[in-house]
Image (spheres, rainbow, N blue to C red):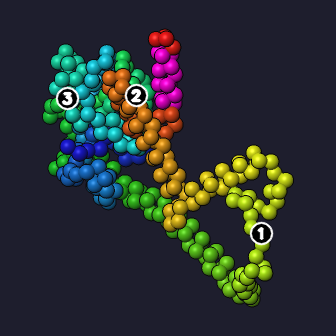
């Protein structure tokens, strides 16, 4: 089931509706918008429905936030999560039947189940990849779960219009006006930049263009003695160490200048190579130690993987010293 989750309410139609709505129908953090004007769909489709003019009909499901204390003690968590790069929560896709979470579900009335949202891990809120990188061994997690029961579903119908509908109907103009104002600012800025570019083109076109210099054809008489790789004409006084450093810098520049590929893409490729190499080293280490690889390493950055690898190497060095 695809829906939108309310992260917070801001000044606008919803806040005005909440002022006069019954307590059980107040839209608040953690609620899920399941349908807009009777239509369900993907999250981006629901967002598109919310921008339509006129009356809005929302079907909202209230959710309750709970807290779990997890102690893995070397056992698998048994939790399959969906991680989105810019999401502020983790989505539970599946609870495995033989994991730590499944055993906790058996002992508690409130159970972690599919489509629940994990909002924090040990009090840490933030982007989903950051929460996933936490060890999850002896931590507290806060999650929101859908509350079952018809009374928890808030439906606004055309037969019984609510304050939310009236605000949406009457406030549609102000909402669209704000969108048009934002679009108008972008349009004016684009027109201004276009005019400046046209003026620059006319100014450069009106002046006399300098004659293009004719390239000289190389011949044996004009050929010089050449230069050292990575150097220039003024490197005669450099020390061997300085020459070696210049050669290394020149080689690095050539490596980062791939024909037909932008510098950002080249940097991204280099980071991916470093990340794959670090993940390979860590996988080999944990396999040799017969340990399960920590969850979330695949979503960690190169810098985080380097720090983790340095920690692993230090721990392994201490173990080798104790064995000797």
**At x 40% / y 56%, what residue is drawn?**
175
Q: Secondary structure at mark 1?
A: loop
Residue at the location (65% across, 81% down)? 201
Q: Is residue 44 visible?
A: yes
Residue 241, percent across and down? 75, 45
Q: Is residue 273 left or right of residue 30?
A: right
Q: Which residue is mark 3?
A: 96
Give the mark, 3 or 2, whose residue is nearer the N terminus: 3
For disc 1, the marked residue is: 225
Does residue 67 appear to the left or right of 220 in the view shown? Answer: left
Residue depicted at x 66% and y 56%: 250
Q: Could one spot residue 18 in this view of the protein? A: no
Q: CA distance from mark 3 to mark 2?
A: 26 Å
Tell me where residue 212 appears, x and y as whole percent: 72, 86
**Image mark count:** 3
Q: Nearer the viewer, residue 217 or 312?
A: 217
Q: Nearer the viewer, mark 3 or mark 2?
A: 2
| The residue positioned farthest toward the front in the image shown | 220
In the foreground, 284 or 43: 284
Q: Are marks 1 and 2 in contact (CB under 8 Å)?
A: no
Q: Which residue is mark 2?
A: 285
Give the residues in magenta: 307-320
Q: In this picture, is 134 found above or below 174? A: above
Density class for disc 2 (Cα within 10 Å; few <14, some 14-19, many ≥20) is some
């Amino acid at each position: 089931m695809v829906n939108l989750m309310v992260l917070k309410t801001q000044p606008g139609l919803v806040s005005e509706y909440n002022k006069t709505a019954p307590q059980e129908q107040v839209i608040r953090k953690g609620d899920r918008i399941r349908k807009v004007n009777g239509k369900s769909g993907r999250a981006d489709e629901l967002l598109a429905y919310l921008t339509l003019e006129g009356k809005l009909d929302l079907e909202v499901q209230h959710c309750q936030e709970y807290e779990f204390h997890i102690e893995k003690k070397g056992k698998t968590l048994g939790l399959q999560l969906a991680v989105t790069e810019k999401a502020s929560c983790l989505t539970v896709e599946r609870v495995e039947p033989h994991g730590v979470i499944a055993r906790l579900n058996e002992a508690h009335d409130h159970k972690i189940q599919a489509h629940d949202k994990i909002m924090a891990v040990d009090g840490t809120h933030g982007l989903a990849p950051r929460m996933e990188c936490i060890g999850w061994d002896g931590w507290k997690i806060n999650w929101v779960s859908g509350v079952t029961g018809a009374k928890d579903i808030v439906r606004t119908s055309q037969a019984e219009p609510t304050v939310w509908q009236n605000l949406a109907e009457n406030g549609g103009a102000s909402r669209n006006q704000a969108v048009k104002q934002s679009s108008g600012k972008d349009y004016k800025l684009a027109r201004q930049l276009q005019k400046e570019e046209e003026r620059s083109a006319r100014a450069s076109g009106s002046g006399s263009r300098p004659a293009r210099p004719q390239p000289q054809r190389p011949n044996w008489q004009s050929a010089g003695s050449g230069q050292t790789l990575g150097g220039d004409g003024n490197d005669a006084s450099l020390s061997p160490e300085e020459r070696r450093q210049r050669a290394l810098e020149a080689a690095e520049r050539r490596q980062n200048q791939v024909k037909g590929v932008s510098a950002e893409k080249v940097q991204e490729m280099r980071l991916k190579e470093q990340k794959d190499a670090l993940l390979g080293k860590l996988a080999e280490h944990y396999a040799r130690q017969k340990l399960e690889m920590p969850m979330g390493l695949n979503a960690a950055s190169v810098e985080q993987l380097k720090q983790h690898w340095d920690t692993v190497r230090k721990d392994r060095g201490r173990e080798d010293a104790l064995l000797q």
